[in-house]
Image (cartoon, rainbow, N blue to C red):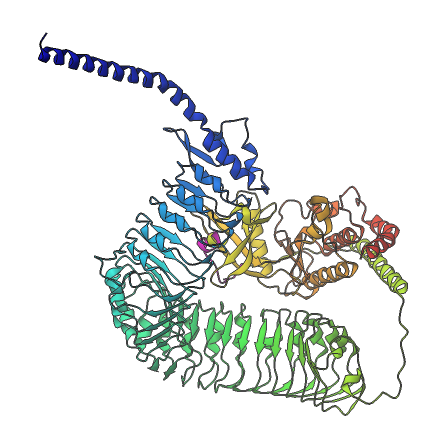
């Protein structure tokens, strides 16, 4: 065999050997394949990571994570979704379950995750840096938690991220520069945190970004050039649609070409920062702009005249800048046919208001020029703006008269013309504004009398006509009727004469009344004591005579009383020292005499003024008044004596209730005959309520009842906490309950009633009918929680003291007394129980939930019918059977319920109808058990 042949043979053997080895390797792989396929569905890495996540969440009130156990495969655990191809976890969705804990770093082992949705919970601590290992992640929603620390810089590794929402947490530090490398990012929401520093220029690289929001932080510096300021060839963010950076400390100027670089911009909010310079005319190149807010900055120069080229403009707010001076741009704004809000207040506009303002959009609801230098007269043609709800022209230099044509603005709710040079009379046509809620004509040169037609403004709550030349007597049409729900009336610094009418007591809703510095005389009417929710009363600078009526001691919520510079005489009523909320009392320059009280407000000389009354004596030593001729020392009562008085008093109250029930059972029952209709209120939209409650999240649910649920919400931009009662319209009677509650609440106002802020009657996102009421939020929850919380949660503490229980009892009694005897139309609550008594931050009680309430007729006609019937009137245990099962609502029903509520407060036991089937046994039960229970409460204090 030759050498060549030998080599060929060797080469052939090597080739066969190589092929044999490859074949054996392939067989080995094929044998392994079934094992890999079988193992994938039970991937232990994902299961272990999820269990570690569960370990870091100690509080799970809804037991959402209880399904995370070995009884089922982890891919079927609640909130977990997996991909069928790899059998790996792809989605972790646990939003809105009130989970409280930290974010486990083991979450990074879920390497196939595409979505993390943990919003609307109570996660705290830092966002783990390990989250940056999730390179497949597309959505990260951690908004509305309490997360702290800095935004992880490792997020820059999540190159597939589309949506990053960290809104409403407690994050601090700077915005990571690396976020500018997330080229697929469409939404970046960082609002309502504690972020500092500037906006990284690298964010200009985000060519897919459509929404950027960083409002309510502590950001400083300039808006970076990269965002819409450099050529698009370098930084292309032309996709940006929503840009929100309000309420920071950003500064700098807007570039001249901002409109060209952001052609798709729809919402542009820069308000409450430190921006300066002119508003670029190029902004109108962004033809899709709908909302612009540049208020509370330092912008200067003219407003671009080409804003009229924005066909979709709905909202333009430029208030609190240095813009001006010409108003010529208003003429071109008439092209914006969809414009609803135009706010140009607190700038430097001057000259005459052009007639073209009357040709603005028919959809305009708010027009504001306050705090400018505008002169001339008011155009009567403003009547063309038929949908106008709010008009502000205050604090300018406007002259002439108020046009009578203003009476045609029938939807007007807020009219502010104060601080001008208007003259003439208040036109009688103002009575046509039946939806008017606020009117301010103060600090002008108006003369004549108040037109009697004002009585037609039956929604009027705030009236300001001070510092004018008005004269004559204060008309009975203003204060002598219960038709006006006036809450604040300022008639000061005019020339009104005559007496303050006795009918002033009809102002059941008045909270602040100022009639100071007029020429009023006569005595202060004793009926003033009927104004039970009055807090601020200014009577100084008149010629009132006689004594301060003792009925003022009935004004339990009074905070300020000024009767100085009058001709009042007699002793200081002792009842004034019992007004617990009185913060300032001015009795100076009158003719008061006798002993000065020493309790209550009289203990603090810094808030009481007595100068100019030479016949006063006594008082606390710091007043340095002469001693009174007779000083009878009152013996101090022992604790035992006080306890006996309290016990006897409360027992007598119960005896009175039961006796009253006997009398009422034998009396002729009344039934209401009047049905009110709901008047226009300043509404909110479904969208606003949806956002305020984080989509009506279960984490914001604070209560539920037979007709709906109550959610805690946060209304922007004031960040005001509210309670939103959403009606379940599928429940029979819910819609009627909504109307009943609106009808009742629209005309009542008392410090011990829950305050309604607004309402919503609209459609939800699914096209279903939606109705809700928005109330002031009560921070301390319901009385029921305070009475029985230990039964529900042993870790809670907060027993009510005896004094607190008595105060709550008085508060509820005041509210019921107001509803029965002092409201514009008598109201029967029909569902008085501890869960419907809410406590504010100061533990003041407020009666709520008027869904079952009844309106009684104003007349004494006993033939009237009930307004409506909604099932059983009242709750089991709190209403006598004869009142609840289809019986007509009447005063004795509320009285009975109040008696049961008192027993529950002082005896500590939830009632049932079995306990009190016979109302006549009510006082016997109280008489037997109450003294022992009161002694028990006192021992616990």
Relative image position of residue 404 (x, y in whole percent)? 42, 78
Decide whether residue 584 is among the magenta residues: no
**Picture quadrant where residue 934 is located:** bottom right
Range shown magenta: 678-690
* Residue 571 in view here: no
Quadrant location of the C terminus? Answer: bottom right
Quadrant location of the N terminus? Answer: top left
Question: Looking at the image, is 7 positioned above or below residue 167?
Answer: above
Question: Looking at the image, is 476 positioned above or below residue 834?
Answer: below
Q: Nearer the viewer, residue 542 or 866?
A: 542
Q: Residue furthest top?
A: 1
How would you classify the magenta stretch by its main secondary structure? loop
Q: Residue at x 69, y 49 (%)?
A: 796
**Picture quadrant where residue 520 is located:** bottom right
**Picture quadrant where residue 521 is located:** bottom right
Q: Nearer the viewer, residue 351 or 304?
A: 304
In-image side of 883 versus 348 (left or right)? right
Relative image position of residue 642 (x, y in whole percent)? 87, 64
* Residue 220 in view here: yes
In-image side of 910 versus 318 (left or right)? right
Q: How many marks?
A: 0
Relative image position of residue 488 (x, y in whole percent)? 58, 73
Question: Looking at the image, is 428 positioned above or below residue 75?
Answer: below
Q: Residue at x 53, y 46 (%)?
A: 102
In-image side of 747 versus 815 (left or right)? left
Q: Nearer the viewer, residue 108 or 844?
A: 108
Relative image position of residue 660 (x, y in whole percent)? 80, 57
């Amino acid at each position: 065999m030759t050498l060549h042949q030998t080599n060929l043979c060797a080469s052939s053997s090597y080739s066969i050997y190589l092929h044999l080895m490859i074949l054996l390797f392939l067989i080995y792989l094929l044998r392994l394949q079934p094992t890999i396929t079988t193992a994938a569905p039970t991937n232990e890495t994902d299961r272990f990571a999820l269990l570690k996540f569960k370990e870091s969440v100690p509080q799970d009130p809804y037991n959402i994570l209880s399904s995370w156990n070995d009884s089922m495969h982890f891919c079927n655990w609640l909130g977990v979704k997996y991909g069928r191809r790899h059998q790996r976890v792809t989605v972790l969705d646990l939003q809105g379950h009130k989970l409280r804990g930290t974010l486990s770093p083991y979450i990074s082992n879920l390497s196939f995750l595409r979505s993390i949705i943990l919003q609307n919970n109570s996660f705290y601590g830092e966002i783990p840096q390990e989250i940056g290992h999730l390179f497949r992640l597309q959505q990260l929603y951690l908004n509305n938690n309490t997360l702290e620390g800095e935004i992880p810089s490792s997020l820059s590794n999540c190159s597939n991220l589309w949506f990053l929402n960290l809104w409403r947490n407690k994050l601090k530090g700077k915005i990571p520069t690396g976020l500018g490398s997330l080229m697929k990012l469409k939404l970046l929401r960082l609002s309502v945190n504690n972020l500092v520093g500037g906006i990284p220029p690298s964010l200009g690289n985000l060519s897919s970004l459509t929404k950027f929001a960083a409002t309510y932080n502590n950001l400083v510096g300039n808006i970076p050039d990269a965002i819409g300021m450099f050529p698009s060839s370098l930084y292309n963010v032309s996709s940006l649609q929503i840009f929100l950076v309000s309420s920071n400390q950003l500064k700098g100027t807007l570039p001249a070409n901002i409109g060209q670089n952001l052609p798709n911009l729809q919402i542009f909010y820069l308000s409450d920062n430190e921006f300066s310079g002119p508003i670029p005319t190029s902004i109108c190149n962004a033809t899709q702009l709908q909302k612009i807010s540049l208020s509370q900055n330092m912008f200067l120069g003219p407003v671009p005249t080409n804003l009229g080229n924005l066909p979709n403009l709905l909202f333009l707010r430029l208030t609190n800048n240095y813009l001006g001076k010409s108003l010529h741009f208003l003429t071109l704004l008439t092209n914006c046919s969809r414009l609803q809000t135009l706010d140009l207040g607190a700038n430097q506009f001057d000259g005459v208001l052009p007639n073209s303002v009357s040709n603005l959009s028919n959809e305009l609801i708010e027009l504001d020029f306050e705090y400018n230098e505008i002169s001339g007269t008011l155009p009567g043609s403003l009547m063309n703006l038929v949908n106008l709800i709010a008009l502000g022209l205050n604090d300018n230099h406007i002259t002439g008269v108020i046009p009578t044509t203003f009476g045609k603005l029938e939807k007007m709710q807020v009219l502010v013309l104060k601080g001008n040079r208007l003259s003439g009379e208040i036109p009688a046509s103002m009575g046509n504004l039946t939806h008017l809620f606020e009117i301010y004509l103060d600090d002008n040169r108006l003369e004549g009398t108040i037109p009697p037609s004002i009585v037609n403004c039956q929604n009027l709550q705030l009236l300001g006509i001070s510092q004018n030349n008005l004269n004559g007597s204060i008309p009975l049409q203003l204060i002598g009727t219960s038709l006006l729900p006036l809450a604040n009336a300022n008639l000061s610094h005019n020339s009104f004469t005559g007496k303050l009418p006795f009918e002033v007591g009809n102002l059941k809703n008045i909270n602040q009344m100022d009639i100071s510095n007029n020429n009023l005389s006569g005595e202060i009417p004793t009926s003033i004591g009927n104004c039970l929710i009055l807090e601020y009363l200014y009577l100084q600078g008149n010629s009132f005579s006689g004594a301060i009526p003792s009925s003022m001691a009935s004004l339990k919520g009074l905070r300020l009383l000024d009767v100085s510079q009058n001709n009042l005489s007699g002793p200081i009523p002792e009842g004034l020292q019992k007004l617990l909320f009185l913060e300032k009392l001015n009795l100076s320059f009158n003719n008061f005499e006798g002993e000065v009280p020493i309790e209550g407000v009289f203990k603090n000389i810094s808030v009481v003024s007595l100068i100019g009354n030479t016949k006063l004596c006594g008082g606390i030593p710091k007043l340095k008044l002469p001693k009174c001729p007779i000083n009878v020392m009152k013996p101090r009562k022992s604790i035992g004596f006080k306890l006996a008085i309290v016990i006897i008093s409360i027992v007598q109250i119960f005896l009175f209730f039961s006796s009253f029930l006997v009398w009422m059972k034998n009396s002729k029952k009344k039934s209401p005959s009047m049905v009110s209709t709901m008047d226009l209120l300043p509404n909110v939209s479904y969208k606003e309520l949806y956002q305020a409650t984080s989509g009506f999240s279960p984490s914001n649910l604070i209560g539920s009842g037979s007709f709906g649920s109550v959610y805690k919400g946060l209304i922007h931009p004031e960040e005001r906490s509210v309670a939103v009662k959403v009606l379940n319209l599928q429940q029979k009677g819910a819609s009627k309950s909504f109307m009943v509650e609106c009808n009742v609440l629209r005309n009542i106002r008392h410090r011990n009633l829950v305050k309604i802020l607004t309402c919503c009657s609209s459609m939800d996102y699914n096209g279903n009918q939606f109705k809700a009421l928005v109330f002031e939020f009560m921070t301390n929850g319901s009385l029921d929680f305070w009475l029985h919380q230990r039964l529900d949660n042993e870790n809670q503490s907060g027993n009510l003291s005896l004094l607190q229980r008595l105060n709550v009892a008085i508060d509820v009694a005041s509210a019921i007394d107001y509803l029965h005897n002092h409201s514009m139309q008598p109201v029967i609550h029909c569902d008085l129980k501890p869960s419907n008594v809410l406590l504010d931050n100061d533990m003041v009680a407020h009666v709520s939930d008027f869904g079952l309430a009844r309106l009684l007729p104003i007349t004494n006609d006993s033939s009237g019918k009930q307004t409506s019937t909604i099932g059983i009137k009242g709750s089991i245990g709190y209403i006598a059977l004869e009142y609840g099962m289809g019986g007509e609502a009447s005063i004795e029903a509320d009285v009975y319920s109040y008696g049961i509520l008192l027993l529950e407060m002082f005896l500590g036991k939830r009632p049932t109808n079995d306990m009190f089937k016979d109302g006549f046994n009510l006082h016997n039960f109280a008489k037997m058990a109450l003294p022992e229970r009161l002694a028990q409460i006192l021992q616990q204090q």
